[in-house]
Amino acid sequence: MTSSETPPGSDPKNAEAPQIPEILIRSGSAFILAAVAFGAVITDLWTFVALVVVAGGLLTWEWGGLTRGSGFDGTSLIATVCVTAVAILVAMGRPDLALIIFGGTAAAVAFAGASPRHGAWALAGLAYVVFPAWALVWLRSDPKLGVAAILFVLAVVWTTDTASYIGGRGLGGAKLAPRISPNKTWSGFFVGVLTPGLIGYGFGLALHETTPWCLAGVSIALALACQLGDLLESGIKRHYGVKDMSQLIPGHGGLFDRVDGLLPAAVVAGLIGLRNIAEPGAGLLIW
């Protein structure tokens, strides 16, 4: 058989079909996700709430599939309803009711598990999704600086991810946590933590009302949370012996795989926003 011949039983069309490079798939998925997120942020508060609710439902589905082997089961449904209620109540300025809803749901999820171990993982998943959703909606609810606050958080997270990848690939060196994530290096970690400081400094110059160096420090704090969130999710996946949380996003795996750094960074940003409870966006950005 010559090199130009086709093996018996094979499909010539499939054999000759060009494969789309992985980098193009990843880039395309990332662009679409970024465009959707940006559009929801700048449109209005309730569009952003809708995005958070949809994302929360997908995250609870992925968590259930990983920890219980069942995606949209009763526990995932309860968690999704909780995320939805919390997001809406926080947007309406009723964090007191949101806290009651979360407390009741947490108790129900913890005691409804088939075993203490399953209950603990279900409760962890609920907190893992609800608190970042709460923080993001609260920051966006600031009528003056809500949009800027969310765009700032997203810019820091995206810069952290990109800088970590480039730094780790370009510089190499010692592994950061080989038992948890073999591909991560200390060089990527430090580049990923320090580079977002430039984003904070740039935001500070653009806002005029804040100290750029202080906002650079805030960026580094969020980048550190982002890195730790990445390691946390890698550790959870390693515990369950999986590479990705799901195959929802082409080239990236699951939604958790894409927002693993955003979740803890959002919580840290929300905690910083407590500096100004009436205007959390200003609490995060104005120093």
Image (cartoon, rainbow, N blue to C red):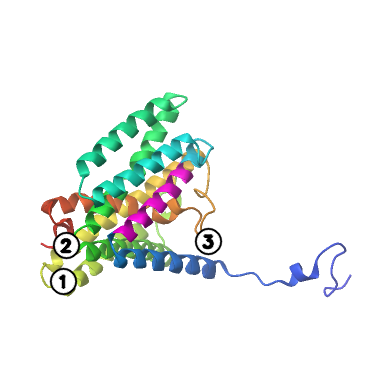
How far apart are the alpha carbons under marks 3 and 2? 33 Å
| Of pointers 3 and 2, the one earlier in the residue sequence | 3
Q: Which residue is painted at 20% across and 70% down in the image? A: 203
**Residue type at tag 1:** Leu
Question: Helix, strand, or loop for circle 1?
Answer: helix
Q: Is residue 50 magenta?
A: yes
Q: Within the magenta stretch, is there residue 246?
A: no
Front residue (pair 231, 263): 263
Q: Nearer the viewer, mark 3 or mark 2?
A: 2
Q: What residue would you read off at disc 1?
A: 207
For badge 3, the amino acid type reads Gly
Please name the predominant secondary structure of the magenta segment in the image.
helix
Q: Residue at x 17, y 65 (%)?
A: 144
The residue carrying pointer 2 sits among few (fewer than 14), some (14 to 19) or many (20 or more) residues within 10 Å by Cα, namely many
Q: Position of residue 71 (x, y in %)?
A: 51, 41
**Which is more toward the observer, 186 or 229?**
229
Separation of marks 1 and 3 at Cα, in angstroms = 36 Å
Mark 1 or mark 2: name the one nearer the start of the chain.
Answer: 1
Residue 113 lies, in percent from the top left, at 44, 27
SS for callout 3: loop
Whole-percent x and y of residue 118? 44, 30
Tell me where residue 39 sits by quadrant: bottom left
Q: Are marks 1 and 2 in contact (CB under 8 Å)?
A: yes
Which of discs 1 and 3 lies nearer the camera? The answer is 1
* Three-letter residue code for mark 2: Leu
Disc 2 target residue: 285
Please state, as top left, top right, bottom left or bottom right, where the N terminus lies in the image.
bottom right
Segment tinted magenta in the rendering: 46-63
Q: Is residue 197 visible?
A: no
Q: In whole angstroms, how far apart are the C-alphas of marks 1 and 2?
A: 9 Å
The residue that label 3 is drawn on is 251
